[in-house]
Amino acid sequence: MAKNPRLLSGVHLMQGQQACAEGALAAGCDLFAGYPISPATEIAEAMARRMPQAGGIYLQGADELDSLTIVIGSVWGGYKSMTATSGNGICLMQENIGYAAMTETPCVIVDMMRAGPGTGIATKSAQGDIYQVRYGSNGDYSIIAMAPESPQEMFDLTVEAFNLSEQYRTPVFVLGDEILSNLRERVVIPDEVKVAPRFKPTEKPAEGYKTWAVPAGKDFSPLPAFGQGYHLAVSSFARTPDGSPSQAYSVQKELSSRLWNKIEAHADELTRVEDAYLDDAEVLVIGFGSVARSVKAGVRQARAEGLKVGYSRLIGIWPFPDNYIARIGKNVKKVIVAEMNMGKVSREVQRCLGRDTEVILSSKPGVLMHTPAEIMDEIRKVI
C-alpha cells in the first residue's frame, strides 16, 4: 500500500472501471453509493474494497434512485461523493439528477453506457445516452459531461469531473461505455493530483443566513454543510435567496437563467477536444469515447494514402462545443460523425454548421464498434 492510500502512484495495468475508481479516490471522493449493474459493477466492487482503505464510505443503495439520493444527501453533509451506473440506471436517477441540478449539488455520476433502449444488452456497448444525461430531467438547467477514450482517461477525467463539479457546483457526468469498462491498458497515476476545494462560506453562522445568496462576481452561492451551525433551506422549489418557495416570474427567470448560464456561458472554457490534420483537411471525421480510437486510426491510414482528412475527438460533450465546431467546420467540405447510436452528436454538429456543410452520420446502434477499416470506407465514399 502506498503512503497515501488514496493515490496509488505509479504505472499500472488497469481496467477502465478500476481506473475510474482510483481517479475518484485521488480526487477526494469520501463516499460512493451505487447499485450493481453491468457494465459498471466493477466500479462499485473496486470502491467497496478501496474506500475503507482510504478512510471513506461505501454504501450499496436499494436501487439507482436511492443511490443518487444518498450521494446528494452526503454532499450536503460535507462529503465529496459519486455514483456509477449504466443507461437504464440513469433512467431511474432522472428525478434526482434534476434535484441535484436545482439544488446545485456538486457530485459525479459515471454512466458506463450499454446497448438499449430499456434493458437492452447488459454486456454490449453503445453510446445512446447522450441526450438522456443532458435533457433527462424536467425544466431548464445545464450539466457537464465528458467522454473518455481509454482507461487512462477514465482516471484523468474522473479527477477532472470532481474538480469541475466543485468549480461549477453542478452534477458532472463521466460517459464511458462497456468497451472502456473492460478494456485493460497502461494507466499512469501521478505522485500528486490537483484537487479543487469546495466553495464554502467565509462568514460564521448567524441569524438570517441566506442559503442561496450569490456573492457579487460569482455564479452560485457557497456551500456549507448541515451540522455546521448554518440555517439551511434546501428543496427543489423555485426559491428566494433565503430558501423560501416563490411563484414570482422574476425569481423563476433569475434562477433558471443562472442554472443555465453558469455552465453554458462558460462553454468555451469547458471545451475539451483532441484534433489533428485540420490545416489542409477537406473532410473532417468526428468521434468520441471508444469509437474515437477507430476514428483516429482510420484517419491516420487515410493520411498515409495522401487523402486530406482530419479528425476531431470530442472529450467534452456537454456543454456542446458550438464555437469550436463552427470554427473547424468552416474550411471543410464534408463532416463524418461516427457514433454508436442512431445519430445524436451528428445532430448537434449539423446544428452548429448549418445546412451549408454536409454532415454524414456513420451509425452503429451498439454491440459492434466501428473498425478503422469502416472509418476508412466512409472516408473513401465522400472524398
Image (cartoon, rainbow, N blue to C red):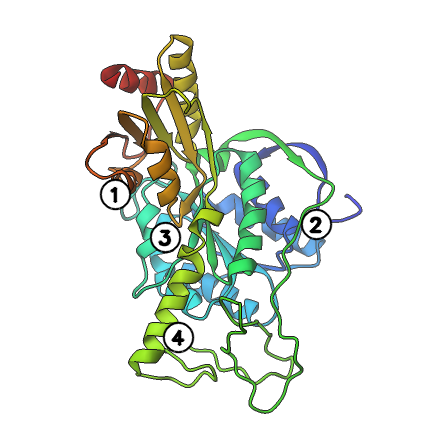
Q: Amino acid at mark 4?
A: Ser
Residue 140 lies left or right of residue 96; in this view the side is left
Residue 206 lies left or right of residue 92; in this view the side is right
- According to the picture, the residue beneath numbered tag 3 turns out to be 133
Q: Nearer the viewer, residue 320 or 119?
A: 320
For mark 4, give the secondary structure. loop
Name the residue located 74 percent from the left edge and 41 percent from the top edge: 191
As drawn, the residue found furthest toward the left would be 355
Q: Is residue 29 above or below residue 363?
A: below
The 10 Å Cα crowd at callout 2, few under 14, some 14 to 19, many 20 or more, is: many
Q: CA distance from mark 2 to mark 3?
A: 29 Å
The spot of residue 205 in percent (x, y) is 64, 84
The answer to whether residue 24 of the structure is visible from this angle is yes
Sooner in the amino-acid sequence: mark 2 or mark 1: 2
Q: CA distance from mark 4 to mark 1?
A: 32 Å
Sooner in the amino-acid sequence: mark 1 or mark 3: 3
The spot of residue 95 in percent (x, y) is 35, 65
Q: Which mark is residue 6?
A: 2
Q: CA distance from mark 2 to mark 1?
A: 43 Å
- According to the picture, the residue beneath numbered tag 4 turns out to be 236
Q: Is residue 119 above or below residue 13?
A: below
Label pair 1/3, CB-CB below 8 angstroms = no
The spot of residue 366 in percent (x, y) is 31, 34
Q: Nearer the viewer, mark 2 or mark 3?
A: 3
Q: Nearer the viewer, mark 4 or mark 2?
A: 4
- According to the picture, the residue beneath numbered tag 1 turns out to be 351
Residue 245 sits in which quadrant? bottom left
Q: Nearer the viewer, mark 4 or mark 1?
A: 1
Name the residue located 38 percent from the left edge and 9 percent from the top edge: 306
